[in-house]
Image (cartoon, grey):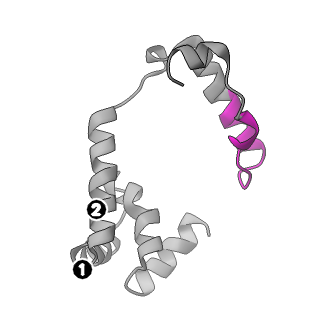
Amino acid sequence: MTRFALLRRFRAADPSCQEAVELVTAYLEGALNARERAALERHLAGCPNCTEYFAQISLCIDVAGQVEPEDLAPAAREDLMALYDRWRADPDSDPGAESSEQRPEDLEHGG
């Protein structure tokens, strides 16, 4: 379901847990309008599972902060760009599925 379709459905009724989870990032980025925010907040107020998920995502964002390209090793940048290129070629596929092979240098660093 596209984000637009999800938002349209989300506006029409109280969101399901799946819909709420799919909109948490948009909420945290400030991309929801007042009605959408209020509906998500109502759902979170009544759903301990989604509230816990929201807390986990918020914590991940707080801990990870923002990673800049220069923070990554060249090989990591190349891997991420290749993954992104595969996803752009076919957004419905799982671009990481064909990247299950680990390199020796990944194993040395716990990758």
Along the line of sight, the residue nearer the viewer: 34 or 50: 50
Is residue 17 placed above or below 92 in the rendered structure? Answer: below
Whole-angstrom CA distance, mark 2 to mark 1, is: 12 Å
Quadrant of image for the C terminus: top right
Q: Residues within 10 Å of mark 1 (few under 14, many from 20)?
A: few
Asked if residue 57 lies in the magenta stretch, the reply is no
User: What residue is at 32 percent from the left and 72 percent from the top?
Assistant: 40
Foreground mark, 2 or 1, reads 2
Whether 47 is drawn above or below 31: the answer is: below
The numbered dot on residue 52 is 2
Callout 2, which amino acid? Glu
Q: Is residue 44 left or right of residue 1?
A: left
* Residue 37 rendering spot, x and y as whole percentages: 30, 69
Compared to 72, does 60 lie above or below? below
* Quadrant in which the N terminus is drawn: bottom right
Answer whether residue 3 is visible to the viewer in this image: yes
Residue 41, position in %: x, y? 25, 72
Q: Secondary structure at mark 2?
A: helix
- Viewer-side residue, 36 vs 93: 93
Span highlighted in magenta in the image: 82-99
- On screen, residue 47 versus residue 26, left or right, reads left
Locate residue 63: give its quadrant. Answer: top left
Q: Amino acid at mark 1?
A: Gly
What secondary structure prevails in the magenta region? helix
Residue 81 position within the rendered picture, expressed as x and y whole percent measured from the top left: 65, 27
Residue position marked by numbered label 1 in the rendering: 46
The answer to whether residue 37 shows anywhere in this view is: no
Q: Spot the residue most to the bottom.
A: 13
Query: Residue, x 65% and y 20% (percent of image)?
Result: 78
Does residue 90 belong to the magenta stretch?
yes
